[in-house]
Image: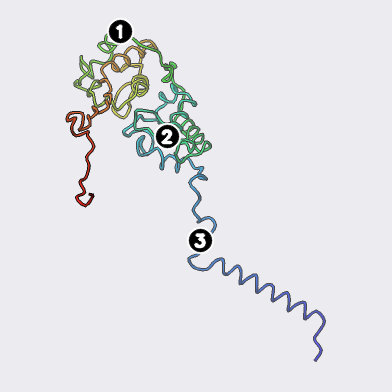
Amino acid sequence: MTSRPGSSLLARTLAAAIACAAIAGCDSLPGKPREADRPIRPSEVTDFAALWGTNCAGCHGADGDRGSSTPLANPVYLASATDAAIRGATADGIPGTSMPAFATSRGGLLTDQQIDLLVQGMRSRWGKPVSPTPPGIDDATAGDPGRGAAVFAARCASCHGQDGAGGPKAGSVVDPDYLQLVSDRALRAATIAGRPDFGMPDWRGESGREPLDAGQVADVVAWMASKRPAPIVATAPAAVAPAHAANPAAAQPTTTRNDHVP
């Protein structure tokens, strides 16, 4: 029997279509993940919420407004800290504190792009204009503890007590353990930005109409820092004298007697 013209081409076309369907069917087998379901590498995460939740929420709170460390979802904090300072603290950590370095170049898990995304995300979500402009948290100048004592008595003692050891509204700011755990920058941050999560006012005071100037901030931080215990300096253990130093006879070489030698 003679096949009709074009039947061979039709058969080949049908075979190709069946093969393609089979290949496509294999890609949708039960249990095979879709491309959208495949996990991405940690270095490829670009979603702010995912980056924040994995790296920052543990200390600064899920929404950035409460936690064991400085709340970053605070417009005053963001107005008084530069992008460069926030980025530097994230990338390099803060020595002497529990803030670790997150940059991959410092042994962390975040790329430079991811750190930039975190800084931009904080600004876009939590930043807003603040009036008057607060002193800069990272504009550190040497303050005077003597003047700082007067500033503390006038502006802080009503909550923290005259000696800073705790009062009717707030706890101690001179506790040795506390001061060993916080940096001078953290003390400036709390003085300028307050702690909204604890009801602590910012540098403008409870009325909001008596802002501290940069010099007063530096002075009161210097006064608190002056209460920090001196660091413990490790000393090398005393050298142990060899046994023969106390017993010269012990230093003499000994010989083994061999009774078989004539």
The kind of residue on which mark 2 rests is Ala
Question: Quadrant of residue 51 in the image?
Answer: top left
The kind of residue on which mark 3 rests is Pro
Residue at image point 22% right, 34% down: 252
Residue at image point 77% right, 80% down: 8
Q: Are marks 3 and 2 in contact (CB under 8 Å)?
A: no
> Which mark's residue is nearer the viewer, 1 or 2?
2
Question: Quadrant of residue 9 in the image?
Answer: bottom right
- The relative height of residue 172 versus residue 10 in the rendered view (above or below) is above
- The relative height of residue 93 versus residue 168 in the rendered view (above or below) is below
Q: Position of residue 126 (x, y in %)?
A: 44, 31
> Which mark's residue is nearer the viewer, 3 or 2?
2
> Which is more N-terminal, label 2 or label 1?
2
Secondary structure at numbered mark 2: loop
Query: What residue sits right under mark 2 in the picture?
Result: 101
Query: Looking at the rendered structure, which numbered label has been put on residue 33?
Result: 3
Kindly report the distance in space between the C-alpha atoms of the residues bearing marks 3 and 2: 35 Å
Secondary structure at numbered mark 1: helix
Q: Are marks 1 and 2 in contact (CB under 8 Å)?
A: no
> Which is more N-terminal, label 2 or label 3?
3
Query: Looking at the rendered structure, which numbered label has been put on residue 147?
Result: 1
Residue 209 can be seen in this image: no
Q: Position of residue 230 (x, y in %)?
A: 27, 20
Q: Position of residue 233 (x, y in %)?
A: 28, 24
> Which is more N-terminal, label 1 or label 3?
3
The kind of residue on which mark 1 rests is Arg
Q: Position of residue 153 (x, y in %)?
A: 25, 11
Taking depth in this image into account, of 107 and 125 the one nearest to the observer is: 107
